[in-house]
Image (cartoon, rainbow, N blue to C red):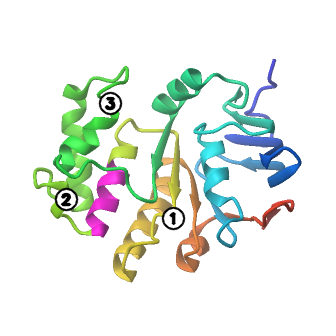
Amino acid sequence: MSPPLRSASGAALSVQNLRHDLKPGDPLLLLPELDVEPGGMLALTGPSGSGKSTLLHLLAGLAQPTQGRILWDGLDLAPLSESARDRWRRERAGFVFQDFHLIPELSPLENVLSTVWFSRFSARPLRGRALELLEDLGVPARSRTALLSRGEQQRVALARALLPQPAALFADEPTASLDAASGAEVARRLRALADEEGRTVIVSSHDPALIALADRRLSLRRGAEAELS
């Protein structure tokens, strides 16, 4: 049985002896230990190909490591089946993909609600929250998503990830395709989610301004142990 995660350290996430191989004997990621507290913000940094997106997917339960433990609130994601990881992610995590994964033909409101269409949550009572999120993020709810700017689409993706009120939020290069003003706004909102709502926020990024807002930075290099600062 996994040990309790909320130990004296108060960690929300605990990683132990994590390794991920591209093929047998060819490690991409080596992470001996990592703890992230509730309401903390962690930035994954490193050159392209260093495994930032891969680690983000592992921590979010979107993939399984070659070895090691990924514990969220005492639950080890690594040995879970795909369906069990999906269930955990629906209930506890939100993910903002780098390319957004929005449906262009739908409205922003429909895209936000799409995250609950096939889950235990009912879209009807969450409609009001979805509208509030879009209004707060400054995005029109009923236009066609395809007509929105990249910055607006990024905010729709963020609203979708926040709809189920996840304890953990993951964002893959959330400012990479945005102009400076839009990127700064997204970065501020991610920091506020940790500070004001107590969510654990983990981002992968090359953006110095976003990285500077994180409490800690995990520097990755392919095949080498990650360095925490």
Front position among marks 2 and 1: 2
Q: Is there CB contact under 8 Å for labels 2 and 3?
A: no
Which amino acid is tagged 2?
Ala
The span from disc 3 to disc 1 (Cα, nearest Å) is 24 Å
Identify the mark at residue 173; answer none if there is no mark: 1
Residue range (magenta): 150-159
Q: Badge 1: few (under 14), some or many (20 or more) residues near its Cα, within 10 Å?
A: many
Q: Position of residue 165 (x, y in %)?
A: 41, 38
Front residue of this view, candidates 125 and 101: 101
Circle 1 SS class: loop
Q: Quadrant of residue 72?
A: top right
Judged left or right of residue 77, residue 179 is left
Circle 3 SS class: helix
Identify the mark at residue 146; answer none if there is no mark: 2
Q: Is there CB contact under 8 Å for labels 3 and 1?
A: no
Which amino acid is tagged 1?
Glu
Q: How many tags in the picture?
A: 3
Circle 2 SS class: helix
Question: Is residue 42 at least partly visible in the picture?
Answer: no
Which amino acid is tagged 3?
Val
Give the mark nearer the N terminus: 2 vs 1: 2
Say if the magenta span includes residue 151.
yes
Main SS, magenta region, reads helix
